[in-house]
């Protein structure tokens, strides 16, 4: 069995190849992905963490499952708040074929999903990106978007100004025109694409700040109590999702649905409809688009197969 670390995951998932692997899996429509399990886990500080189980398989080809812990109490320590491992099995024999670093796999596939969605939902001339958040996903989001378009300006905002400066410096070292900002409202108003990857439980992005034509990408929230954008963002936007089941359970959509601001029929399309051409995506230059990404197991499996296949394991394993 292969043991594939974070460096291997990053090396074997170049952005363009990873986005194409995700798109191919969605177009094929042959992946089985039951609803993920999310279980509450008590934290030492009295808060609530989570254990997530995300299985997925393609008949006679591959079986995989990602196990994730979300421990928000780690934010005050040197430990990451999200930790994950991915197990890949042969789809014919059921034998385990690889254990893959789940943190790197999640960061890469999540960023690739956002950039793939933005291919269809952001304006073609979008050049100004705002990253909200400073965790492991933040630099990956910026780099994935940069692989899709020439960015003239990348702003990074975080609750911790020092962390935002570090993230911006990391991106600048990799050739991106990145700076840290402390005025979130101004940065939102100036952005063409806004990518949020935080554990916020109250809105950070306000609809009144959005300029016409903005694309909003919400990544961080996956539970009903987690929320990155307010009701006005939802009201002003055409709403798209990675998958209806996962995204609808997140607070950014679940809370507006509960209050009657949004209905399931208001969701324009999922990512599969976008990449297959069943929905045209953005319809006008002034349209504000919202993509809610909560993560889906088929994307993990597609990314894991790309990694395993690239290092000599069976891509179908």
Image (cartoon, rainbow, N blue to C red):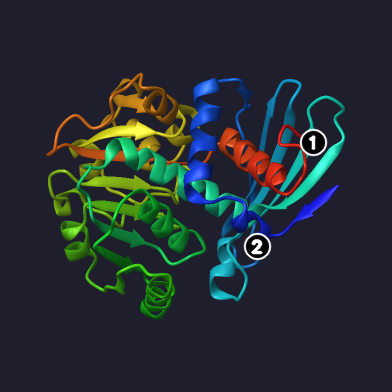
Q: Which of 259/165 is in front?
A: 165
Tags 2 and 1 touching, CB below 8 Å: no
Q: Residue at left 61%, top 57%?
A: 11
The location of residue 210, given as percent across then percent down, is 17, 50
Quarter of the C terminus within the rendering? top right
Q: Quadrant of residue 168?
A: bottom left
Please tell me how crowded label 1 is: few (under 14), some (14-19), or many (20+) other residues with Cα within 10 Å.
many
Q: Residue at left 34%, top 31%?
A: 257
Mark found first going from the N terminus, 2 or 1: 2
Q: Which of 148/117 is in front?
A: 148
Q: Residue at left 23%, top 32%?
A: 282
234 with respect to 60 (left or right): left
Query: Would you place residue 250 above or below residue 281 in this image?
Result: below
Closer mark to the observer between disc 2 and disc 1: 2
Residue 89: mark in rendering: 1
Residue 7: mark in rendering: 2
Q: Which of 58/196 is in front?
A: 58
The location of residue 20, given as percent across then percent down, is 49, 37
The location of residue 188, given as percent across then percent down, is 21, 58
Query: Would you place residue 57 above or below residue 299 in this image?
Result: above
């Amino acid at each position: 069995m292969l043991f594939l670390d974070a460096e291997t995951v990053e090396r074997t998932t170049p952005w363009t190849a990873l986005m194409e692997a995700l798109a191919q899996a969605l177009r094929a429509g042959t992946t089985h992905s039951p609803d993920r399990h999310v279980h509450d886990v008590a934290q030492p500080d009295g808060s609530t963490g989570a254990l997530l189980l995300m299985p997925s398989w393609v008949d006679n080809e591959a079986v995989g499952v990602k196990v994730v812990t979300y421990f928000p109490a780690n934010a005050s320590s040197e430990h990451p708040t999200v930790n994950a491992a991915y197990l890949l099995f042969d789809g014919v024999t059921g034998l385990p074929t690889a254990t893959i670093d789940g943190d790197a796999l999640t960061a890469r596939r999540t960023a690739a999903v956002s950039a793939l969605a933005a291919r269809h939902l952001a304006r073609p001339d979008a050049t100004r990106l705002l990253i909200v958040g400073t965790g492991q996903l933040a630099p990956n989001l910026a780099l994935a978007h940069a692989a899709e378009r020439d960015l003239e300006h990348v702003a990074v905002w975080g609750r911790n100004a020092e962390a935002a400066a570090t993230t911006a410096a990391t991106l600048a070292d990799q050739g991106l025109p990145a700076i840290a900002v402390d005025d979130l409202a101004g940065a939102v108003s100036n952005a063409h694409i806004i990518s949020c990857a935080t554990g916020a439980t109250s809105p950070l992005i306000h609809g009144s700040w959005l300029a016409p034509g903005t694309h909003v990408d919400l990544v961080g929230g996956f539970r009903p109590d987690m929320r990155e954008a307010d009701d006005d963002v939802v009201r002003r936007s055409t709403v798209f999702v990675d998958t209806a089941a996962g995204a609808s359970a997140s607070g950014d959509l679940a809370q507006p649905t509960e209050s009657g601001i949004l209905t399931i029929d208001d969701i324009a399309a999922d990512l599969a409809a976008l990449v297959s051409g069943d929905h045209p995506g953005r319809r006008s230059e002034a349209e504000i688009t919202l993509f809610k990404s909560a993560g889906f197991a088929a994307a993990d499996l597609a990314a894991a197969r790309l990694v395993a296949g690239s290092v000599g394991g069976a891509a179908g394993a």
